[in-house]
Image: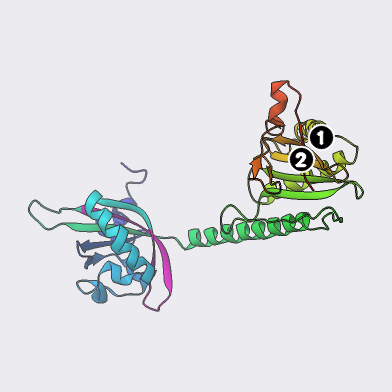
Amino acid sequence: MSADDGLLPALDTAEDLFENAPCGYLSTRMDGTIVRVNRTFESWTGFPRDALLGRTRFQDLLSAGGRIFHETHYAPLLLMQGSVQEIAFDIVRADGSRLPSLVNSVVRTPAPGSAQVVRTTVFDATDRRRYEQELLRARRREHDIAQQLQRSMLSGVLPSAPDLAVEVAYHPAERGLEVGGDWYDAFWVIDDHTAGLVIGDVVGRGLQAAAAMGQLRSAVRALASTGLGPAALLTALDRYAARHGVGWMTTLVYAELSLASGRLRYACAGHPPPIIVSPGQEPEFAWDGRSMPLAAHMQTGRPRGEATRELAP
């Protein structure tokens, strides 16, 4: 049934629907040889029918990468499943330019006992490809901004004294994923006497995680300057995270090292424990002074703990 019985019969013939459909139609043998195409496919690709029918395989129209994908994925899936959907191919036009496309194919047997054919629809994905590239460029811009933000926050002069040397080794967990909420810091709590040491990890990656990391890094320095010890500092940081909605579930370890006594006070909020290497001894994990990540520990109602170790010179 239709809304306009006077107009559609003149336009809605099966032949017109096939030839001038808003997508490309083609039929091929199982080996890919094209046996039928519509006018839309001709106009999109620039190939006349005479150059396609019985002479060209569908895979011959694809880019080099598309031909490999056709051989390794498209054709096997078509044989096993009888259909494939939304396969992205670049079709090489007659003038050498490329048509980004989405392809759907289904295997059909026109009549009992006849050879199988593959019926394929081709959709122009030019706008979709352009949109995807814009998203990719935006993501790269965000990555570059976050990387610059992270590096600027992690840069700076580390504390140094005759009895103290601070070295940093920073390695992303995965190659190419440098940007995120990981951070380290070292600063004087009491000039040339007590050093504050921090390693933390904000949940997530990208600009948002880097920004949260910057807020928490600054908050740790500010709280440490008030004279709070490790456990009290983490408690204050809990309240900061909850009040400002930043850094939930962040893990970190904060430590204060007295150069005069060699005493290390530390507290861990869900972070991997510090490793202590004493002269002539095996490295050991410092498992004491542990509690849950930021903000989460507030739900327990228990005070945060801390621990103390005496370090050899």
Judged left or right of residue 118, residue 127 is right
The image shows a total of numbered marks equal to: 2
Q: Nearer the viewer, residue 181 or 121?
A: 181
Whole-angstrom CA distance, mark 1 to mark 2, is: 8 Å
Above-or-below relation of 156 to 199:
below
Residue 199: image quadrant is: top right
Judged left or right of residue 286, residue 189 is right
Say what amino acid the circle numbered 1 marks.
Answer: Leu
Q: Which residue is mark 1?
A: 233
What is the x, y in percent for residue 228? 86, 34
What is the x, y in percent for residue 269? 70, 35
Q: Alpha-carbon neighbours of circle 2 within 10 Å: few (<14), some, or many (≥20)? A: many
The quadrant in which the N terminus is found is top left
Among numbered discs 1 and 2, the one appearing first in the sequence? 1
Judged left or right of residue 234, residue 111 is left
Say what amino acid the circle numbered 2 marks.
Answer: Tyr
Q: Nearer the viewer, mark 1 or mark 2?
A: 2
Above-or-below relation of 62 to 214:
below
The reply to whether callout 1 and callout 2 are in contact (CB within 8 Å) is yes
Residue 63 visible from this viewpoint: no
Residue 247: image quadrant is: top right
- Which range is magenta? 88-107
Residue 217 visible from this viewpoint: yes
Task: Name the dominant secondary structure of the magenta segment.
Answer: strand
Say which element carries label 2: strand
Q: Which residue is mark 2?
A: 254
What is the x, y in percent for residue 163? 84, 53
Q: Nearer the viewer, residue 300 or 211?
A: 300
Say if the magenta span includes residue 58. Answer: no
What is the x, y in percent for residue 77? 27, 54
Say if the magenta span includes residue 94. Answer: yes
Above-or-below relation of 258 to 99:
above
